[in-house]
Each structure stands twice: as structure tokens, then as C-alpha cells.
Image (spheres, coloured by chain):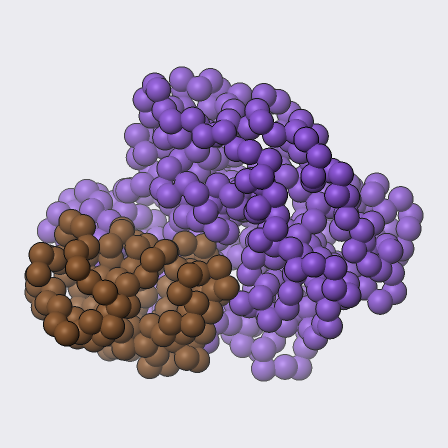
Chain colours: A brown, B purple
Amino acid sequence: MQNSVDPLFGGQAAGKALVLEEPLSFWGGVDISTGMIADPHHPQKGSSLADKVVFLPGTKGSTAGPGALLELIYAGNGPAAIVLTEEDSITVIAGLVAASSFGITMPVFRLEGKLEKVDSDRWIELSENELIVSD
Amino acid sequence: MSDLVSLSDHDQAIQHGELGEAPKFAMDILLGVANATRAKRLVSIKSAHIVGSYYGGEADLKVLQRLNALEARVIVPTTLSSSGLELSSKQESVDYRKNCEVVEAYQNMGCRAELTCAPYHLEELPSRGDNVAWAESNAVLYANSVLGARTNMTGQYLDICAAITGRIPEVGMYLEENRKGTIIIDLSLLPQRWLTNDGFYPLLGLFLGINLKGEIPILIHGNQNVSVDYLRSLGTGIATSGNTPMFHVVGVTPEAQTLADCQAKSGLEIVKVTPSNIRAAKQMLDNGNEALSAICLGTPHFSVREFEVLRDLLGGRSIARKVKGLISTNRYNKLQIKQSGLLNEVEGLGFEVVTDTCTYYGSTLGEVEGTVLTNSAKWAYYAKANLGVDATFLNMKECVESAVAGAFVRDEAFWDAK
């Protein structure tokens, strides 16, 4: 596969892919008790973030996103990892606070270049600089 | 991790824990964000505005309690945004107690409990060119665009980390070159009466937020008397549906005296906004003519001027008994309208004026049956997901006429005709 990643923090992760088509607001846009996208304006409303490798084209809306994502992670409904396909700091802040305050790791990676050949539900393994897609 | 970020001696002292554990905790987060956003260095800030001053859950409360245990203190003037409910009216509920715990945790760090999403209504404002770390997206748009101060969409926790250290990664809006407009928004196809009406600006903002995709818009307005309330509504709309941190209005906003002042280069793409663009944005926020249950004004917090406009539109008429009327504002504005007698007038006509919070989340609105009417695109956009209620956006005049009649009163001719 062509994708290479830059680990922003956290190390290895694996999970099913969820490739988001649009930016997400974690505050008000995700149901913390289930991990499902609840924003009625998001095209993937109803998809679950829990245990997924979420390919995220950035965040939008409220700056209170880190708190909502932190609650999601703390409740055990957070993503396995986030791969940023656009720059974002909301997810990075939540991940850093979850790690330093609760010892829970939700790695965040930055995609280098354009995202190629990844569909939702494919199995993703992430290590240092590699993103491996399998069936 | 912070190899690429060049740190001052003072930053390094904080990083190594020489100023205590709390500043070190804060610096670790600042450097993580600096790395993720490719900042080259940190810069100093003059003030901070904090977004997380409501009860969002146990994880958040534990983080704040830990900061208290580490004796974290802010070193720049720091204000708090809205809380989860009106804290100045004491209640015996878990919700009330938890919100108080969050606010007290921030107060313990030296933050001021102004509890407003509109810090630009407070007396001390940043000046043009000042670096600040404001969170609360509508306030960020206002600070950059209307005040000419410099801030990114500071995320929750990054805001308090910046306030504890007085530092922030120098990326985005802190850099002069990133503040220039990159696309021209031409409003000349729109009916002139829209441009002088409050209801137009939230919809324009919503449309731009959805469509800008990282561009900073330069609006050609053709009228240099755009009120700050309208600019506020425009920014709020943009921040609701998008992530653009700034806009320019030529001849109106401080960094856009002329087009040449604010454009990134000459020959920018020009987008002409059409009437159908605005009507489509309005349609997104329309839940039909169901029974009218409540009217919620003041998202972001109602300005004193907006209270005056409301009083004039009411013209002494009370709102219908079955319609719950709520207006959110801050303690500072409420004190002003109390002194002028305006508070008594609007309360006498059936409105309840709520401070410290906003009605589009939390428990203030309570149970309602039927559609909630609002003059805020932000309220209508978030209502379903936050509160589970249907909401419809209309302009202030339509809101007032509907509230008085107890049923939807729409000015179709205003929105439809060319």
C-alpha cells in the first residue's frame, strides 16, 4: 500500500477503518454513550467510532471537542486510533490529555500525502511509519 | 517530539519542571500541539478565554481536579465561557452541583467566572495585533475579524494550558501571512433588504462555513454600516458549520480598509452568493409550522443593542402565554439593562432573561412539546443533536411576531422575492 504516516504520539494500533467523508464536531456531534456519530448534518450519522481506526479530514464546530472526545475515550467508546488526513489539533489535545491524565492511549497519526485505497471496514494496522491495509 | 520547535530558555525551564508540575503538564500539551501543527516556536499571549466551564463528564472533572491538586495558576487575565445552567440561581440538583465544581476548579486557578460566550461584550478587550488564546468558536471569529486581535480556534485544555504558561504555538492566525483573505465573496446578487436585516447574516455564515474549506473570505458588502451584532452573527454562522477562523469585510473590518490590504494576492477567485444559496441555508434550519412551544434568543449572548431592538419590535405586546420565551445573555449586559429599565420591560412582556449559560444545551429549556423558534443559526443547527428538539430559524421580526401570535408568522415575501 502507498500510505505512509507520521506518528504524532502513541505508537501502534489496529482496527477496522472508518473513513470519514467530512470533518466532525466531537462536541454535539458524537453520542458519548455509544460512540456513534449523532450530528444530523454529517453524511455518516449512525456510524460508530468505537475501536475504529478513524480517518479524519479535520474537525469543525465547537472548540470544546477535546472534552467530548476525552469523555468518549474515558467511557471506552473511543477510536482505536485516529489518522489525520487534514491538520487538526482537537484530537491531538484529547489524546495527550487522555494519556497524561488517565494512562489511556489513543494514538494519533498524520497521513503523509494523499489517502490511497482505503475503504471503511478494511482492517488497518499502524506502526511507527507504516499503515498496512488488509482484507 | 518537540525537536522542530525552538524553545526559549523560559519555555525549556517550564518543560523541565523547574516552575512546578502544573506548568510542565501544560507545556507538554502545548508542545504536542506545536509538533502536530508544525509550529516553529511558541509566542506569548495577553489573555485567554476558556471554553470548558460547564460539566461535560467525569473525565473532564478529574482533569481539572488534578490541575487543582498540582496548584495550577493562570498567569494572564482569563475569563470563562458559558456554563451548563444559570449558576447565580441556586438549585438543589446534581447538574447544578457538578457545574459549580467545574467553575470552581477554574476559579481556583485564577480564572474569572464571567460565564459568557461573548467575551467581546466585556469591558476589557484585546487591541488590534494582540495575541490572545480564545476558545469558543464565535468569540474567535469576533476577535480575529472584528477586533483584529490574533487567536486560533483554541481547543479546550489548550486554552487553560496557554493561560497557565502564557504561551501558545505560533501557527495559523498568529502569523500575519495567514490572516489574508484567499477568496472573494460577492454579495451583489442578493436583495438589498437582506443586507440590512439581522436574519441574513447567520444564514450567510452557515452557507460560508459549509463551503469555504479552509479559505479566508473577503466579503464585498457595498454598505459600510454593518453593525457589530451582524458581524457577530456572520462569524457565529461560519463557526457553526465550518472551521474558518476569520473573515474580512472590505471597508468595515479593521484589517480590510481596502481590498488590497486584506487579499493574499491579486486575482483571487470570486464567488457570487445567490439568493437560492441563502434560501437553502434557511431551509436546512426549518422544521415547518408545527406547534410553537418556545422562543430562544441570545445564542451567542444577546447584546444590549439586541435587547433594544427586541423591545422596539414588541412595541408593548406580550408574547403568547403558551410560548416559553428565553433570552440568554451575560451578567454584564443584564446589569446594564437592569439599570436602564429594559430588563423590566422585556420580563413584563413574558420573556425570561437567563445568564451564565445558553439554552441550546444543558437543562435550562426543559421539556417542550413542539418546535422551538430561534433567531440563531447556531441554536437551530445544534438543537436536534443536543436537546432532541426540532428548531426553526427565522429573523428577529418573524420571531417576535410568532411569539406574540403563539404560532408561526412567516414573512415569505421578505425571503422569497427578488
x and y percent of residue A54 in the render? 27, 66
Give the image quarter of residue A81: bottom left
x and y percent of residue B336 in the render? 74, 46
Left or right: B54, with B89 as reference point: left
**Along the viewing direction, whichever of B185 and B237 lies nearer the viewer:** B185
Quick one: quadrant of the C terminus of chain B? top right
**Along the viewing direction, whichever of B6 and B110 lies nearer the viewer:** B6
Quick one: quadrant of the N terminus of chain B? bottom left
Toward the right, the furthest residue is B316
Asked if residue B260 can be seen in this view, the reply is yes
**Along the viewing direction, whichever of B388 and B410 lies nearer the viewer:** B410
Left or right: B395, with A4 as reference point: right
x and y percent of residue B292 in the render? 77, 63
Give the image quarter of residue A98: bottom left
**Above or below: residue B323 compared with residue B184:** below
Q: Residue at x 70, y 75 (%)?
A: B367
**Above or below: residue B312 compared with residue B94:** above
Q: Residue at x 39, y 59 (%)?
A: A24
x and y percent of residue A50 in the render? 32, 77
Give the image quarter of residue B310: top right
Q: Residue at x 71, y 64 (%)?
A: B371
**Above or below: residue B322 compared with residue B80:** below
Left or right: B74, with B241 as reference point: left
Q: Residue at x 25, y 45 (%)?
A: B42
Asked if residue B75 can be seen in this view, the reply is no
**Above or below: residue B83 compared with residue B309:** below
